[in-house]
Amino acid sequence: MVVVGPLVFAALAAAETIPTPDYCAAIAGKQWVSPLEARQCIYSFPVVPEIKDNIIEVVNKTIAMHTSVNYQISAPKPFDKDVHEDLHKDLARIKQQEYSSEFEFHLDVFYAFRRLNDGHCVVINRCYDSLYVSYLPTPLVLLTAADGQQNVHIAPEAFAIASAEFGDEIEFWQNALPGKLKGQLRLSGAQVLSINDQDPFAAVNANALVTGGYQSYATRQNSFFSSYYRGDSGWLYQMGNFAQQVHPLTDAVKLAIRRINSTSIDTITLPYRSRFGSASKNFTDSASYRINNCLATNRTNGVDVYAVSAQQESEEPLPIAYFQQQPLISRKEARRHAMNVLVDALPLSDIDLPEIMQPGPALNESYSVAQFYLLPDNSTGVLALGSFSTANFSAFQHSLLDGLVELKSLGATQLLVDVTNNGGGYICIAHWLHRIIIGSRSTTEPQAGLDTTTRAGPLAQLIVQRIIKDGMDPDTELLYNPSKWSNASHVPFTPETDWLKPLTNLTINGHEDAFSQRLGQECQPFDVDPPRKGLFKAKDVVIISNGRCASSCSLFSITMSKLEGARVPIFSTIDTEIKTTHLKNHTLAPPDFLANIVQGSLKNGKTTPADLNFPLTMETVNRPDAIWEAVSKEVFKSFVPPPLVVQIE
Ligand SMILES: *[C@@H]1O[C@H](CO)[C@@H](O)[C@H](O)[C@H]1NC(C)=O
Ligand SMILES: *[C@@H]1O[C@H](CO)[C@@H](O)[C@H](O)[C@H]1NC(C)=O
Ligand SMILES: *[C@@H]1O[C@H](CO)[C@@H](O)[C@H](O)[C@H]1NC(C)=O
Ligand SMILES: *[C@@H]1O[C@H](CO)[C@@H](O)[C@H](O)[C@H]1NC(C)=O
Ligand SMILES: *[C@@H]1O[C@H](CO)[C@@H](O)[C@H](O)[C@H]1NC(C)=O
Ligand SMILES: *[C@@H]1O[C@H](CO)[C@@H](O)[C@H](O)[C@H]1NC(C)=O
Ligand SMILES: *[C@@H]1O[C@H](CO)[C@@H](O)[C@H](O)[C@H]1NC(C)=O
Ligand SMILES: *[C@@H]1O[C@H](CO)[C@@H](O)[C@H](O)[C@H]1NC(C)=O
Ligand SMILES: *[C@@H]1O[C@H](CO)[C@@H](O)[C@H](O)[C@H]1NC(C)=O
Ligand SMILES: *[C@@H]1O[C@H](CO)[C@@H](O)[C@H](O)[C@H]1NC(C)=O
């Protein structure tokens, strides 16, 4: 489930009292403020009981349709130690609790959902989340020294990033440095010995408990550090949770560092600075802040697709699109193709990876997030794949095939697929890529995927009844329309089939849950004819990531490794990673889409860490081509079959 707030009604605005003094007026129009100034504004609004009750009601009704909620009360193996969150209990507690401000209430809801560690089940309120984003000029990395010791460092590129991205604001930080360091933010590469007087890993682990998005603890630890990402039009840089935060909650951090070539230890205190969010709406005072950022718009909730004329329906991406970890996709393209994508409270980064760290020119068949390279050994091809979504599905599908064919024609016999920070996207592109790499086999046809089923609670059943009995979806716009699905033998359902049935009734952590019958695939036959023979042998394909490979990305990685005889990757179990739902309280509203992968799929696999954990050094960190060359040398050097999944750490 994804709830993009604000779930409130315009009529209530009038009833609100505007706080005095007006802390929002004091920061209106400013690009940079201190976290304290931002907090004074966003903490200044009291709870409005009607809004609080509405949010709890809508959220509560929506989680009734979401798959992971009951499982996460006590997550199945291998995440049994990592996830124990009972949202029903949380909401009951939150409903009773008094809050001194609406933001305090929101944070309680926000963190409860984060603790599910499910990148699809989040509550984002645009009134508060990423309204002001807090930054430090010192993103951190985890490096492995020659002796094998792993240490936290300020990223070698920190100064280059900060000066390019933060402009004049960098002086604020330079002037905050003590004594001889004042005025020169030359901290890049320094080893971090402590954070707020504690071992750096105390901060890494504290962040892992609240960052959400991934079930795997190690992946959530990785979220603390900076990383790279292939975006739609260039190479981008993720600051990581240490240097970039969704809320202005922290004022400063104290670090003990040892700079490069220095034997002494410096202690510095760096203040966070909060920047007005890229999706935040301008305001001049508290009243306009509320109206522009906190009230529901005509796009916050679902629509009756048959009551809105084609002209009225904006092609503009939905509000949720800004938080999906993929390039912006038009509503039309998003409706036409099934998606499975991660949602985060931070919009996708638009900070450029410094040019000298970017790989050289890509091959001609590259398109958007899919970039092809041939390494200097002339035998290793690279597909850097930052997402499973692009603005043009068809162009993307062609590019993946043409690029791999081009690599082969240039002599590539082995392939690295780098899915670092790939937040997912089109489900059928994940299937397509798997199919063209591996060729026509029992594991790729009729589907390169896994058994799916969907949650079939009372509301879902009611929607299906309205469609099949009352003919309320003549144009097959809705995801609950039987015409969109096929049965376990891949035969499409006829329009009148009550396709959720027969139901499977399960009791999950003490809660009763109904699921649909097993479902088949909806991707094949593809619009483009795939070559019958695979382009690469499974043993010659290596998937590289930093663990942050979600949704359709994990579908691709897991099916590649599981079905093609390789080992199980670190990423995530399928049961909670692969699902999509939208919040709509109208019975006829679109989606409420749930695509869930049956729990049994991974039972035979051991969720071991990745097949190879690849340590980063000062020379390779955040430099994609250096990492590819080093990984290629390591995994393809011998006659031993290479590991399929490489986790960068
Ligand atoms: C919001 O304010 C900024 C800075 O004051 C300005 O550059 C921008 O154009 C404004 N945006 C809108 C939509 O008015
Ligand atoms: C959530 O909904 C369930 C089922 O209708 C209800 O029993 C429960 O009291 C609701 N919880 C809250 C916090 O409103
Ligand atoms: C550290 O010392 C080495 C050897 O003297 C030198 O090459 C390098 O440039 C120095 N690095 C920095 C950041 O001062
Ligand atoms: C939604 O609101 C915007 C302006 O706030 C308006 O331009 C648009 O026509 C409205 N759309 C619908 C379908 O009411
Ligand atoms: C790639 O495109 C460029 C510019 O269109 C062209 O000069 C070059 O020959 C092409 N390379 C290959 C390998 O086709
Ligand atoms: C790779 O191909 C290029 C261009 O044909 C050639 O200059 C280079 O020597 C080759 N490298 C290796 C390692 O064979
Ligand atoms: C999408 O790409 C295809 C090529 O695969 C092209 O024919 C089509 O015109 C493109 N669509 C848009 C909207 O650009
Ligand atoms: C799927 O539907 C076809 C046609 O009705 C039927 O023959 C087949 O048995 C069904 N498969 C399953 C698994 O229900
Ligand atoms: C599941 O429960 C429903 C009622 O909630 C019932 O109609 C159905 O027969 C049950 N299915 C099975 C397989 O027990
Ligand atoms: C959806 O919920 C809102 C708020 O609770 C309510 O005003 C509206 O009538 C509901 N729509 C339907 C179809 O029930």
Image: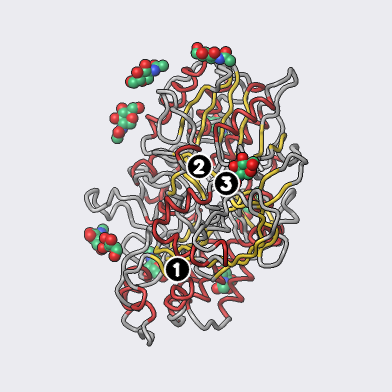
Residue located 64% across and 49% down the image = 260
Q: Secondary structure at mark 1?
A: loop
Q: For this view, does 95 lie left or right of residue 305?
A: right
Residue located 62% across and 33% down the image = 559
Marks 3/1: CA distance?
32 Å
Q: Secondary structure at mark 2?
A: strand
Q: Write down the residue under mark 3.
A: 156
Query: What's under tag 2, amino acid-wise?
Result: Tyr
Tell me: is circle 1 under 8 Å from ligand 1: no
Q: Residue furthest front?
A: 180
Q: Nearer the viewer, residue 485 or 594?
A: 594
- Mark in the foreground, 3 or 1: 3
Residue located 56% across and 49% down the image = 226
Q: Write down the residue under mark 1.
A: 128
Coordinates of residue 612 in the picture (x, y in percent)? 71, 35
Among numbered discs 2 and 1, the one appearing first in the sequence: 1
Marks 2/1: CA distance?
26 Å
Query: What's under tag 1, amino acid-wise?
Result: Tyr
Coordinates of residue 444 in the picture (x, y in percent)? 58, 25
Q: Write down the residue under mark 2.
A: 229
Coordinates of residue 181 in the picture (x, y in percent)? 56, 61
- How packed is label 1: few (under 14 Cα within 10 Å), some, or many (20 or more)? many
Q: In the rendered image, is residue 463 in sight?
A: no
Q: Residue furthest left?
A: 311
